[in-house]
Image: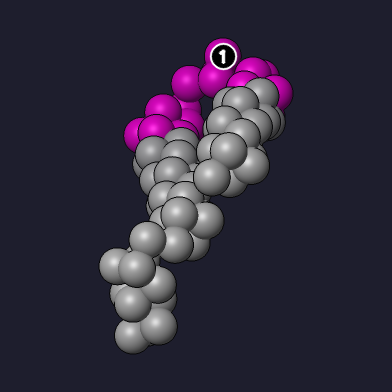
Amino acid sequence: MYNLINSLSNGDQKMFWLIFDLIVIATFHLIWFSYLFFKRKDSELQSIRKPLYYRSLQYILCICLGLLIAA
């Protein structure tokens, strides 16, 4: 943990963006699954749940990958 904090304070941009991307992906999953928990009785949501999840995850992963490549 000390090495991680030390590398971030020394300006290691790739490590910073990697951690940022992991936090973004984890936050997306937390929001997605909490939304499904409250809306799971909706029959319309059941039919579009998987395509919407994969499409949203694809956009987020593309953005995160672009940030990692740009760093």
Asked if residue 68 shows in the view, the reply is yes
Q: Is residue 58 left or right of residue 25?
A: right
Q: Nearer the viewer, residue 2 or 23?
A: 2
Tag 1 residue: 44
Q: Quadrant of the N terminus?
A: bottom left
Q: Residue at x 34, y 68 (%)?
A: 10
Residue ranking furthest to the top: 44
Q: Residue at x 64, y 42 (%)?
A: 69
Residue 4 is situated, as x and y percent measured from the top left of the image, at 40, 76
Q: Is residue 50 magenta?
A: yes
Q: Is residue 14 left or right of residue 52?
A: left
Q: Nearer the viewer, residue 54 or 38?
A: 54
Could you say whether the residue bearing mark 1 is in a helix, strand or loop?
A: helix
In the image, residue 16 sits, relative to residue 46, either above or below, namely: below
- Tell me which amino acid carries mark 1: Glu
Q: Residue at x 32, y 74 (%)?
A: 5
The secondary structure making up most of the magenta span is helix
Asked if residue 19 shows in the view, the reply is no
For the magenta stretch, what is the residue range? 35-52
